[in-house]
Each structure stands twice: as structure tokens, then as C-alpha cells.
Image (cartoon, helix red, strand yellow):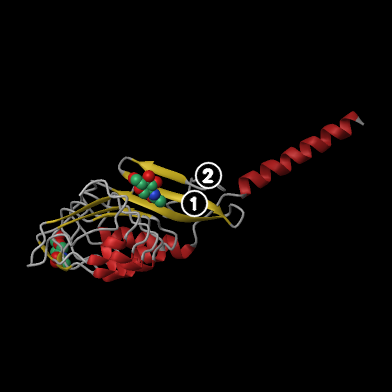
Amino acid sequence: MLFNRFLCTSFLLFLFFLFGCASSATLPTQEVEAFKVALTTLKKTNVAFNEDPCEGSSSGSESSTINRWKDVVTCDCSFASGTICHVTKIRLKENNLQGSLPKEFVGLTFLQEIDLSRNYLNGSIPPEWGVLPLVNISLLGNRLTGPIPKEIGNIKTLTSLVLEANELSGELPSELGNLPNIKQMFIQASGLVGPIPISIDSLAELKDLRISDLNGPESSFPPLKNMKKMETL
Ligand SMILES: *[C@@H]1O[C@H](CO)[C@@H](O)[C@H](O)[C@H]1NC(C)=O
Ligand SMILES: *[C@@H]1O[C@H](CO)[C@@H](O)[C@H](O)[C@H]1NC(C)=O
């Protein structure tokens, strides 16, 4: 009887062990591909990640960050009972990246944060990013040119948009006033032309706004009456 119970317990432990080993979560192939192509576009050569950047994340975990020197990729591995991961954050700050911004990030359909601050990235901001559920975008301190795509105004989840210290040009899109959750917006480039869209006055969550070096006759701030949460101006 005692022996039986022992056998039974061992068997259960064995099953538990098997299940535990077999349950490692994976990133869908399409995301692995998108990530790989995106790294190529950025010209990231010293790749610190595995082909599947979520490999090694704890399965089932809502957020598991793989942090190798200045390379940070966060994966959410809680999908499909903890068997599927999605990339949620990519931070490659101060990486000496000399490529351009990958439109392929669109393949990472759960991406919430892109932080590529202080690199040497050139080219323009891909309008394609407008379909992503982004919360934070920082492209601070690169060599980006071209306009701010109006599609940025489609990212309703966006809370922080930092585009300072680039060489952007063109008119400020009035669609920037369509971001209901935006808290922080830093935009500065002498190639950008005002006016500052009056639509930003309707941004109820905006706390911190910095728009400077605009050109054009109407480049000063419009009368802002509704920005209740504004802390600095
Ligand atoms: C966005 O940035 C804020 C401030 O750095 C941070 O607290 C928050 O966790 C970020 N959210 C995401 C989804 O990356
Ligand atoms: C970006 O820089 C590379 C050289 O580093 C150059 O070959 C390429 O033409 C530049 N692209 C743009 C859009 O300026």
C-alpha cells in the first residue's frame, strides 16, 4: 500500500516534470521573420539575441525582459495558455545603429514600445507603424528626415511620442490632435513648419508638451484652453 502510494507520487512528479519541460513558449514564425528583417534594416550587426528573441523568456509570464547590455527585448508569453509569445518592447538605445527605421515592425503586432534613442538612423518614419498598438515611441537623437506621418495619429494607445533632435521636415500633421491617451509629446526640428495644430488643445491627458524650432509664420502656440493636465509649457 505504502509502496503503491510512493509509485503513484513518483509517477505524478514525473508527469509534472515532463509537462514543465515541454511547455516552453514560442514566438510565431511570422514574428521571428519580422524581427530578423527589422534588425537587418536597422543594421544591427552585433546581434545579442537568438533567432527567436523570446527564447529563454519564462513561459506563461506576462512580461519577460531579455536584457543584454544595451539590447532589451520584452516578450509577453501568456498567450494560448502560456505556449505563445509576442514581442511587446524593443529598446536598442545608444547602439550605434546606422540603418533606417524598419517598416517590418508591423509584423510584430503586439509591439507597445519602440525606443531607438541616440543612434545614427536615417531615412523617414514609416507610416506603416500607424497600425501598431504602440504606447511609447522614442526616436530621440537620430538623423531622421522627412515628415511626421499623419498615420501616427491613428495610434490611439500612444502615451509618449519623442522625436526631438532629428532632421524632420514638413508640416506638423493635425492628426497629432487625435491621440486621446498622449501624455508626453516632444517634437523639435528646424525643418518642421507650423502652425501647431489647434487640435492638440483637445488632448485631455497631455501633461508635457515641447514643440520648438518650428518655421513659418504661424509657428507659435495657438490659444490653448482645454489642456487641464498640462504641467510644463
Ligand atoms: C511607457 O513609458 C513609461 C515611462 O517611461 C513607462 O512607465 C511605461 O511602462 C512604458 N509602457 C510601455 C508599454 O512600454
Ligand atoms: C542613410 O545613410 C546611408 C549611409 O550610412 C546612405 O547610404 C543612405 O543613402 C542614407 N539614406 C537616406 C535616406 O538618407
Query: Is 118 placed above or below 148 here?
Result: above
How many residues crowd around disc 2 within 10 Å: few (fewer than 14), some, or many (20 or more)? many
Q: Where is residue 71 in the image (x, y as percent from the top left)?
A: 33, 46
Element on which disc 2 rests: loop
Numbered tag placed on residue 58 in the rendering: 2
Q: Position of residue 223 (x, y in %)?
A: 19, 60
Numbered tag placed on residue 48 in the rendering: none
The residue singled out by tag 1 in the image is 76
Q: Nearer the viewer, residue 151 or 231?
A: 231
- Answer with left or right where residue 54 lies relative to residue 124: right
Query: Is 173 placed above or below 220 here?
Result: below
Residue placed at 72% from the left, 40% from the top? 14
Q: Nearer the viewer, residue 230 or 188?
A: 230
Task: Look at label 2 and name its amino acid.
Answer: Ser
Q: In which quarter of the image is the N terminus?
A: top right
Element on which disc 1 rests: strand
Mark-to-mark CA distance, 2 and 1:
9 Å
Mark 2 CB within 8 Å of ligand 1: no
Task: Look at label 1 and name its amino acid.
Answer: Asp
Residue placed at 77% from the left, 36% from the top? 10
Query: Is 205 placed above or below 147 here?
Result: above
Q: Residue placed farthest to the front in the image?
A: 225
- Is residue 187 in view from this perspective? yes
Residue placed at 78% from the left, 40% from the top? 11
How many residues crowd around disc 1 within 10 Å: few (fewer than 14), some, or many (20 or more)? many
